[in-house]
Image (cartoon, rainbow, N blue to C red):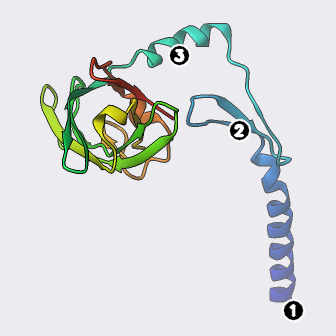
Amino acid sequence: MKTKTWLGSALGALVLGAACLPAAWADFELSDGQSRRILLKDDGTWRYVEALPSSGAASEPAKQQPQAELLLERRMDVAGGCRFELALVNTLTYEIRSLVPDFAVYRANGVAYSVQTAGFGPVRPGDKGRRAVQFGGIACADVAKLQVQGGDRCDMGDLQKFSDVTGECLARLRVRPSELLLFEKGP
């Protein structure tokens, strides 16, 4: 009988403690992929936390972080299409183990004609990696713009293929303007 009473009391205390546990897990903050602070409330709601004026100045240098450079070195007509030769110059202090962006060619009317993927890596600090991307079915004269996109599963610095951040890989990449055609970063 005493064991049954003791077990009942222990079970009651456990249930009471579990009922009080969510109150101990009150509101907490976290950051999203764009460094905005979010307050998660224990009632299941959330809101953005306004940044203090002094924190805006602290986040400014993050926008000016070092960037590797992507250059469009050459474009040439090939049988049945257009070929672009690119160079990735690693001006960062760490190795770019893997960066696989998409390259889209656009016609003068703004319509994307085709998208190709090209991988760079490994590229050590101070080194240059070269790749070529070829688009079939379109002449170089018909290409008005080459746009760099995606690349969200890079492996460089603190980013790796399992990092769940959008745009951070391309944020560490500066696309140098080209005299050959409009060459830019896209969404």
Badges 3 and 2: C-beta atoms under 8 Å apart?
Answer: no
Q: Amino acid at mark 3?
A: Ser
- The numbered mark at residue 151 is none
Please rate how many residues cluster around mark 2, counting C-alpha atoms within 10 Å: few if below 14, some from 14 to 19, many from 20: few
SS label for mark 3: helix
Please rate how many residues cluster around mark 1, counting C-alpha atoms within 10 Å: few if below 14, some from 14 to 19, many from 20: few
Residue 68 vs 17, above or below: the answer is: above
Residue 86 visible, this orientation: yes
Please provide percent x and percent y for residue 17.
Answer: 81, 61
Measured in 3D between alpha carbons, the distance from the residue under mark 1 to the one under mark 2, in whole angstroms, is 45 Å
Please report whichever mark, 3 or 2, sits nearer to the chain's N-terminal start.
2
Q: Amino acid at mark 1?
A: Met
Q: Quadrant of residue 19?
A: bottom right
Q: Nearer the viewer, mark 1 or mark 2?
A: 2
Q: Amino acid at mark 2?
A: Phe
Q: Residue at x 78, y 43 (%)?
A: 26
Q: Nearer the viewer, residue 59 or 141?
A: 141
Q: Residue at x 27, y 17 (%)?
A: 179
Please report whichever mark, 1 or 2, sits nearer to the chain's N-terminal start.
1
SS label for mark 2: strand
Please provide percent x and percent y for residue 129.
Answer: 15, 36
Q: Residue at x 68, y 13 (%)?
A: 52
Left or right of 43: which side holds 151?
A: left
Please provide percent x and percent y for residue 142.
Answer: 37, 35
Q: Mark 3 sits on what residue? A: 59
Measured in 3D between alpha carbons, the distance from the residue under mark 3 to the one under mark 2, in whole angstroms, is 21 Å
Please report whichever mark, 3 or 1, sits nearer to the chain's N-terminal start.
1
